[in-house]
Amino acid sequence: MDLDDIFELHDDVKDDLKFFVASDVRVKILLSLIKGSKNLTSLRKELHFSSSTILHGMYQLEEKDFIFREAGKYYLSQVGEISTHKLIDVIKSVYTINKGRNLFLNHEIGSIPPELLKDIGCLESSTIIKSTSTDIIKPYTIVSKFISETNNVKHLSSVFFASNIELLFENLEANGQIHLLFTEEILKILLKTVNSETIEKCASSDNLKLGIVGDNTQISLTLGDKFIALGLFSANGDYDLNTFLISQSKAAIFWGERLFNHHLKFAKEFKL
């Protein structure tokens, strides 16, 4: 779909978009009813609006066929349910963008495909970890702790941080499962840094998988069973050592799995 088509679609739905965002009351009624039907008393207690205010919002929503009333209770219609789920997605996405402004703004996001940028709300429960003047490697210290506590790690990166790589191979020697996707330059550094016997031993046991991603990959992603850590390059091409996004939520980890698998699809398997 080209830009002209989007402009045309926008013209068709702009009044509906305004209807969603222009009223705090209508939004909260929809969000409340997504959890189940409610009567007016329950809505008043939960939303802290007066009965007249809620009823006015209800009337507007009923006119749009988003809700209906039956036996003294209010329900979302099928259209209302679909619309509210999308509304929740938008709320989460905007919240994530605002929370992660220091990570996303003036950083390279080209290694994150559009379908995952669209689902950025999956990261809404993430924490942005920044370096401080007294702990300049704070983001990496936290990631190292996560790595040391899991045996199953996937790592996609176009940067090399020696101490975390050492931790990964310690996990391998403890019978962990590690899948690494590196640019060719970083893979060469890995092969020079890590003892060749260790690499060969791990690779022969199928506990280590290696892949090569394109040189234009600009990202650092580390995934464990219970965490995701994401780092980005600055817009000027330098890797930002000072800021990481970290989350332990299932939605964020699944988002990270999709990102890893996206790059895995285009990676070239590396055999020793």
Image (cartoon, rainbow, N blue to C red):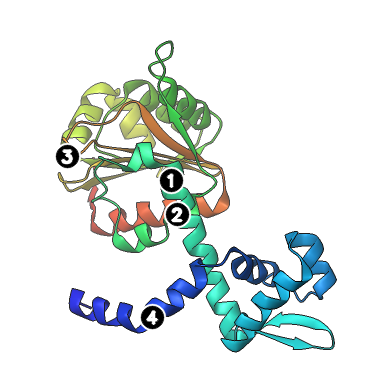
Q: Which mark is residue 155?
A: none
Where in the figure is residue 120, as x and y percent of width and height? Answer: 42, 55
Q: Position of residue 175 (x, y in %)?
A: 50, 35
Name the element at disc 1: helix
Q: Nearer the viewer, mark 1 or mark 3?
A: 1
* Number of numbered discs on residues: 4
Q: CA distance from mark 4 to mark 2?
A: 20 Å
The residue located at (64%, 86%) in the rendering is 62
First reached walking from the N terminus: tag 1 or tag 3: 1
Secondary structure beneath dot 2 equals helix
Are there few (<14), some (14-19), or many (20+) residues within 10 Å of tag 2? some
Crowd rating for badge 4 (residues with CA inside 10 Å; few <14, some 14–19, many 20+) = few
Name the kind of residue labelled 4 in the image.
Val
Task: Answer with the quarter of the image where residue 56 lies.
Answer: bottom right
Dot placed on the residue nearer the N-terminal end, 4 or 3: 4
The N terminus: image quadrant: bottom left
The residue beneath circle 4 is 13
Viewport quadrant of the C terminus: top left
Q: Secondary structure at mark 4?
A: helix
Q: CA distance from mark 4 to mark 3?
A: 47 Å
103 or 221, nearer to the observer = 103
- Vertical relation: 78 (above or below) 155: below
Labels 2 & 1 near each other (Cβ < 8 A): yes
Which residue lies under the disc numbered 2? 94
Instruction: Identify the residue at image location x=75%, y=87%.
Output: 69
Amino acid type at mark 3: Glu
> What residue did someone put label 1 on?
98
Which residue is farthest top? 134
Q: CA distance from mark 1 to mark 3?
A: 34 Å
Q: Are marks 4 and 3 in contact (CB under 8 Å)?
A: no
